[in-house]
């Protein structure tokens, strides 16, 4: 039994040398373990357990693995010999006491395998008594945070999380990341979900707050792993972090647990804490997306705010009670002021609970005053919403903090990459990285359909207040960069869409260097449409601080937006401010342009009397300056305004005067535009043949000039004239062609007008069904553009 004696000597030696109290011997034994670990499965993990637990049973396991792994391999047997010589001294350093090792497997000389309580000895004298002790059972950990009895909604989120669980492959632990802004309810959602599927994790549910956004330092990995190990029953835990992690993986290999890692800041905090068993589940909550965890197969789930009805329900359950039902409109105002953020709504509900006599309307009034819910909603003396946002803000890199403050200055609800680049004086790539960082931190939301970004309402308020607390001069520079970017980009769109209109000066304090996000007409018009509120914000700010040249130039650059998309109220407001700015600047040419373009806005708003007033001022202004080109423009405006009022003779005088001036100065395109208006006048006089002559020539000259938009206007009116003159089929064909042209040009107003004209032709042809179809299609378009025109179409449909 030489081998048996050698094994016993080896085991005894391991018992005596595993302690850290003899560092040199410990280093040597660790080196031997490492040399054998590559070829002995499970040895490294077993040695970590042996060092952690400290008992001979665990050390015995290492010896068994060594001996079993050695088999007939000379290299490993040599390792054992070395170990034996160094630590056994050629003889056992002391016989092992009888050990009780439930379910412990023992191997003798690589052949005999004994299971259960084992005594190894040369001779046995007398009776042998085995004392069995009942195993100590550690309580199964159930550490999830409690879920409020006021939990509401989240049906869609829970359904999606269950779908993730059901579809997950069973060969690797499942990892789910719940991301979202501070206070959105990520932890509550995670805890509620995990409690609902607790039976899938018989060995427990573990929880830790990783402290990614707290005031102190994030939780240390060593402490977190030790907490988890002790929760699972480990009585002795290694000192080194890597050994703790190895022990965590060993202990979780054969158990099924759920782990909730709350407030993670980085993916690196998460990776070492994933258990080994593929049936286990890890849920991570973070204000960042932690997209790097997708490399480990993580599913990313964004948690949004509650909807209005769910928020009202939370307000009621949380403390509002019957007051909410009795003041439903006030309750909706409260949750809206809370931006439907669960944390904010819960704090508002707590205020109602603490003051049973307070009305919901009074709470709404309180939230709307001063600095609003950021400072009004408090928890234990602190403004909880502000603290949460301050923590997220404080975790941003310095350059992203500057961008956040910069965006807080801007008077807009949506941001584009180009806008942020220009306002922060960085490249487009740098701006995109900053925006992505804010999205990752759940401070910003991206609209995939437009490529723009927006702040959640409370985050926007926070950014605004942070900016206002900053340097006033820097904020002024940011706003000037914003205005210059708006002016520059709108001017580039104007040059594509209305090149003949692009004739007045453009002045920049900070000329933008970022390329414009469009290259063709369709993209330019789309940009103007999606940025119309941004452009108006720039106009209003310029007017308020008397950046007069910037103000009127912005209005002038927005001409294609007004012409093609017809936002009547915006048209009038912008030109009212633009005219005042041009007058303060003393720019006569700019004043004339604002008067004629603004008159068109009043006419488009169906305010012909105001339009005539503006056109008359423009006419007098042009005559004072001897500007015949502007005089003709004013006459065209007057003629169209008189036509709208039904003053046909006055309309004819002004329009013929405009045509004469334009022909005299060789302004061919301008003459063609006058002929379009004369064609409309002839149609109003029921003279379709005369109208056709004007419109046919106008269409030819405008096509030659490359003005496809106005050529389509002439074509549509020509189709109407020919149909009125008895050429119904030819007229309808022209109208349909014009409709296609307006679709390509992106002019919904003229699309609707063309459809209405076809409906009129069908009605005159005694085909009410066809007329109804065309009118209905036109009404749908008008409903998005002009309530007055939509109402007119309703009347036509009723007449049918």
Image: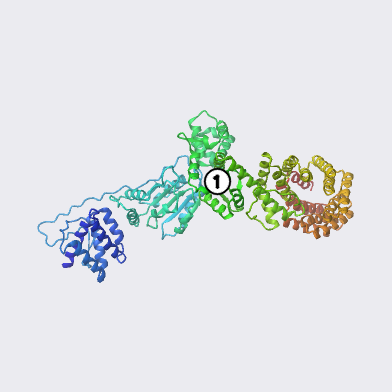
Q: Position of residue 250 (x, y in %)?
A: 33, 57
Q: Is residue 440 left or right of residue 17?
A: right
Q: Is residue 299 left or right of residue 451?
A: left
Q: Nearer the viewer, residue 128 or 439?
A: 439
Up-down: is 36 above or below 393?
below
Q: Residues within 10 Å of mark 1 (few under 14, many from 20)?
A: many
**Corner quadrant of residue 569:** top right
> Residue at the location (56% across, 49% down)?
445
Q: Nearer the viewer, residue 87 or 347?
A: 87
Q: Is residue 152 left or right of residue 260?
A: right
Q: Position of residue 616 (x, y in %)?
A: 83, 41
Q: Position of residue 625 (x, y in %)?
A: 83, 44
Q: Give the tally of numbered discs.
A: 1
| Residue 445 visible, this angle | yes
Pick out the residue farthest to the top.
Answer: 357
> On the rendered image, what quadrant is the N terminus found in?
bottom left
Q: Nearer the viewer, residue 751 or 636?
A: 636
SS class, disc 1: helix
- Coloring scheme of the render? rainbow
> Residue at the location (64% across, 51% down)?
512
| Residue 163 visible, this angle | no
Pick out the residue farthest to the left.
Answer: 126
Which residue corresponds to mark 1? Answer: 404
């Amino acid at each position: 039994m030489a081998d048996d004696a050698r094994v016993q000597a080896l085991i005894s030696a391991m018992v005596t040398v595993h302690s850290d109290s003899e560092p040199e011997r410990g280093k040597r034994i660790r080196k031997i373990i490492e040399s054998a670990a590559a070829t002995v499965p499970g040895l490294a993990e077993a040695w970590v357990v042996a060092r952690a637990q400290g008992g001979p049973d665990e050390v015995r396991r290492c010896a068994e693995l060594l001996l079993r792994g050695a088999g007939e391999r000379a290299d490993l047997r040599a390792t054992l010999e070395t170990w034996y010589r160094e630590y056994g001294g050629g003889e056992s350093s002391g016989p092992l006491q009888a050990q009780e090792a439930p379910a412990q497997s023992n191997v003798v000389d690589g052949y005999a395998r004994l299971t259960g309580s084992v005594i190894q000895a040369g001779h046995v004298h007398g009776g042998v008594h085995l004392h069995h002790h009942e195993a100590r059972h550690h309580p199964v950990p159930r550490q999830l945070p409690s879920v409020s009895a006021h939990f509401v909604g989240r049906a869609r989120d829970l359904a999606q999380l269950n779908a993730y669980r059901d579809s997950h492959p069973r060969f690797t632990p499942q990892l789910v990341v719940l991301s979202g802004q501070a206070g959105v309810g990520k932890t509550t959602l995670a805890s509620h979900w995990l409690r609902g599927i607790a039976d899938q994790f018989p060995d427990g549910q573990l929880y830790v707050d990783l402290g990614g956004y707290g005031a102190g330092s994030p939780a240390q990995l060593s402490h977190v792993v030790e907490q988890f190990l002790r929760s699972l029953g480990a009585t002795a835990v290694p000192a080194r972090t890597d050994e703790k992690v190895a022990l965590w993986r060993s202990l979780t290999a054969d158990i099924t647990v759920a782990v909730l890692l709350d407030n993670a800041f980085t993916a690196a905090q998460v990776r070492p804490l994933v258990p080994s068993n593929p049936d286990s589940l890890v849920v991570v909550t973070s204000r960042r997306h932690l997209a790097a965890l997708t490399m480990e197969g993580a599913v990313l789930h964004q948690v949004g705010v509650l909807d209005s009805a769910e928020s009202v329900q939370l307000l009621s359950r949380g403390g509002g009670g019957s007051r909410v039902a009795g003041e439903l409109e006030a309750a909706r105002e409260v949750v809206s002021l809370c931006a439907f953020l669960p944390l904010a709504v819960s704090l508002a509900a707590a205020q109602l609970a603490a003051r049973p006599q307070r009305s919901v309307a009074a709470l709404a009034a309180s939230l709307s005053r001063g600095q609003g819910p950021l400072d009004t909603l408090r928890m234990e003396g602190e403004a909880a919403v502000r603290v949460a946002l301050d923590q997220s803000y404080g975790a941003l890199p310095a350059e992203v903090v500057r961008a956040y403050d910069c965006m807080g200055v801007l008077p807009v609800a949506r941001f584009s990459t180009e806008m942020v680049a220009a306002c922060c004086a960085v490249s487009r790539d740098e701006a995109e990285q900053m925006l992505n960082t804010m999205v990752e931190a759940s401070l910003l939301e991206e609209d995939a359909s437009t490529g723009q970004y927006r702040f959640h309402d409370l985050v926007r308020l926070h950014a605004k207040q942070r900016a206002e607390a900053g340097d006033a001069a820097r904020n002024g520079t940011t706003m000037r960069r914003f205005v210059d970017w708006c002016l520059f980009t709108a001017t580039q769109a104007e040059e594509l869409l209305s090149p003949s209109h692009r004739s007045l000066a453009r002045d920049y304090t900070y000329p933008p260097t970022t390329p414009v996000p469009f290259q063709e007409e369709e993209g330019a018009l789309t940009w103007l449409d999606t940025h119309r509120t941004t452009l108006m914000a720039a106009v209003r700010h310029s007017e308020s601080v008397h950046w007069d040249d910037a103000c009127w130039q912005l209005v002038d650059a927005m001409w294609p937006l007004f012409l093609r998309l017809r936002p009547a109220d915006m048209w009038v407001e912008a030109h009212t401010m633009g005219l005042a700015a041009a007058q303060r600047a003393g720019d006569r040419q700019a004043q004339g342009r604002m008067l004629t373009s603004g008159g068109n806005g009043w006419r488009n708003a169906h305010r012909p009397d105001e339009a005539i007033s503006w056109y008359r001022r423009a006419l007098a202004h042009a005559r004072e300056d001897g500007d015949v080109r502007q005089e003709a423009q004013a006459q065209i405006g007057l003629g169209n305004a008189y036509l709208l009022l039904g003053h046909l003779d006055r309309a004819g005088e002004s329009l013929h005067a405009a045509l004469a001036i334009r022909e005299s100065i060789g302004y061919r395109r301008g003459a063609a535009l006058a002929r379009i208006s004369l064609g409309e006048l002839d149609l109003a006089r029921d003279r379709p043949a005369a109208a056709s002559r004007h419109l046919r020539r106008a269409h030819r000259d405008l096509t030659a000039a490359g003005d496809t938009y106005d050529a389509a206007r002439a074509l549509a009116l020509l189709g109407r004239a020919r149909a009125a003159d008895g050429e119904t089929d030819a007229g309808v064909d022209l109208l349909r062609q014009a409709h296609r042209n307006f679709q390509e040009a992106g002019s919904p107003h003229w699309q609707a007008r063309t459809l209405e004209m076809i409906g009129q032709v069908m009605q005159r042809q005694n085909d009410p069904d066809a007329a109804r179809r065309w009118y209905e299609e036109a009404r749908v378009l008008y409903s998005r553009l002009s309530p007055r025109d939509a109402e007119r179409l309703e009347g036509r449909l009723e007449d049918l």
